[in-house]
Image (tube, rainbow, N blue to C red):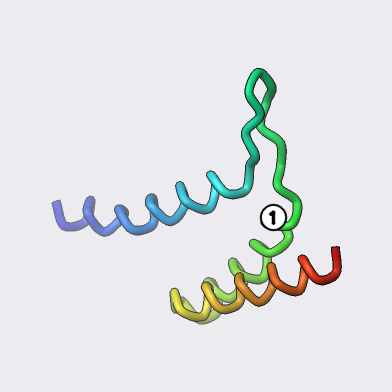
């Protein structure tokens, strides 16, 4: 049971990330949210390297801020 519960935070985080990567349009297929998708790449790299939720959040926020300034 404890091994099963260890996957809950991963599945919740994956659901939150995936839901933000797509924009819903009524009557049409969801479209890809390009700025969020680009900002996800450095955040995932930070997650793999540091395994720290704080580092992932900071890198993701900074990456999205830079992308919004550029676009």
Q: Residue 6 occupies which quadrant of the picture?
A: bottom left
Q: In this view, does 45 lie above or below 8?
A: below
Identify the residue at the far right of this view: 70
Q: Is residue 40 left or right of residue 7?
A: right
Image quadrant holding the C terminus, namely bottom right
Q: Is residue 21 above or below residue 9?
A: above
Where residue 57 sits in the image (x, y, percent)?
52, 73
Q: Looking at the image, which is closer to me, 40 or 25?
A: 25
> Crowding near pointer 1: few (<14 within 10 Å), some, many (20+)?
some
Identify the residue at horizontal 85%, vertical 69% (top origin).
Answer: 70
Identify the residue at horizontal 45%, vertical 47% (top origin).
Answer: 15
The residue beneath circle 1 is: 37
Where residue 31 sits in the image (x, y, percent)?
71, 36
Identify the residue at horizontal 14%, vertical 51% (top origin).
Answer: 1
Q: Is residue 70 left or right of residue 17?
A: right
Where residue 5 sits in the image (x, y, percent)?
22, 54
Where residue 66 sits in the image (x, y, percent)?
76, 74
Q: In this view, does 26 lie to the left or right of 51?
A: right
Element assignment for label 1: helix
């Amino acid at each position: 049971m404890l091994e099963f519960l260890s996957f809950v935070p991963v599945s919740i985080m994956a659901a939150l990330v995936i839901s933000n990567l797509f924009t819903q349009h009524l009557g049409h297929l969801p479209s890809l949210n390009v700025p969020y998708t680009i900002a996800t790449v450095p955040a995932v790299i930070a997650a793999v390297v540091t395994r720290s939720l704080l580092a992932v959040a900071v890198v993701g926020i900074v990456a999205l801020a830079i992308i919004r300034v550029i676009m």
